[in-house]
Image (cartoon, rainbow, N blue to C red):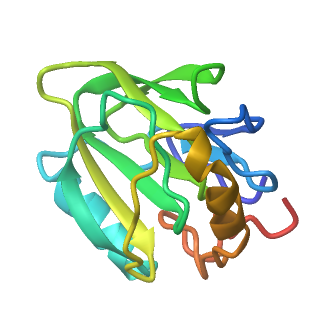
């Protein structure tokens, strides 16, 4: 692994296509534990860091409580406050605990759903080159079109947290 957060670790997860949630056939989910240090302005810190590395079109909110994925872009989620248990990969995926300072980088097609969260849970999301995103809910009728779109999503130029020194751009994955 190229780089890990100073205070944390880096985890990679791969998920199979389950017929509803395609996930990504080539690229892993990346989790940076404690990617940024705790502060009273962590949401702004994430927005700034993501933007510096070309991940824009940012928003602040939580994670939807239903399985969904994006077929036309990759996504980064920086946990600015609180904690949550998020299921990645669809119904047969894996539930991971995320807390303030953690980052999840989801390649296009990666299913995600909030299973539970603290009342103060806040996420900052962004997309490489400010790409717009779709919301796919795993409808079998959309599956084949989604798989085709996922295959054409370009790799990001930089890792959203560590720029040219992070795990992403998934080169050699």
Q: Quadrant of residue 81?
A: top left
Residue 34 % position (x, y): 44, 39
Is residue 44 visible in the rendered image? The answer is yes
**Residue 173 percent coordinates (x, y):** 84, 59
| Closer to the camera in the image, 137 or 6 | 137
Residue 102 pos. (x, y %): 42, 40
Is 110 located above or below residue 90 in the figure? Answer: below
Q: Residue furthest front?
A: 141
Examine the rendered structure and indicate whether residue 130 appears above or below residue 48: below
In this rendering, does residue 168 appear at all? Answer: no
Residue nearest the observer in this picture, 165 or 56: 56
Q: Residue at x 61, y 39 (%)?
A: 21
Name the spot of residue 52 as percent of width and height, x first: 38, 80
Task: Please state which of residues 61 and 162 is positioned toward the viewer in this rendering.
Answer: 61
44 vs 152, nearest the viewer: 152
User: Is 43 drawn above or below residue 91 in the view shown?
Assistant: below
| Rendered residue at 61%/21% (across/down) | 94
Residue 1 falls left or right of residue 130: right
**Is 107 displayed left or right of 121 in the figure?**
right
Residue located 71% across and 51% down the image:
24
Is 121 left or right of 28, judged from the image as shown? left
Q: Residue at x 41, y 77 (%)?
A: 131
């Amino acid at each position: 692994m190229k780089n890990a957060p100073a205070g944390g670790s880096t985890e990679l997860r791969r998920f199979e296509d389950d017929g509803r949630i395609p996930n990504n056939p080539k690229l892993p989910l990346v989790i940076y534990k404690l990617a940024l240090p705790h502060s009273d302005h962590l949401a702004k810190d994430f927005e700034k860091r993501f933007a510096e590395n070309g991940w824009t079109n940012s928003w602040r909110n939580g994670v939807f409580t239903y399985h969904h994925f994006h077929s036309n872009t990759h996504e980064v989620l920086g946990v600015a406050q609180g904690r949550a248990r998020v299921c990645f990969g669809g119904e047969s995926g894996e539930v991971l605990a995320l807390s303030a300072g953690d980052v999840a980088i989801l390649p296009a097609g990666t299913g995600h759903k909030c299973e539970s969260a603290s009342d103060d849970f806040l996420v900052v999301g962004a997309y490489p080159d400010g790409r717009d995103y779709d919301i796919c809910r795993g409808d079998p009728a959309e599956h084949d079109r989604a798989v085709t779109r996922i295959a054409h999503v370009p790799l990001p130029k930089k890792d959203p947290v560590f720029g040219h020194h992070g795990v992403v751009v998934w080169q050699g994955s």
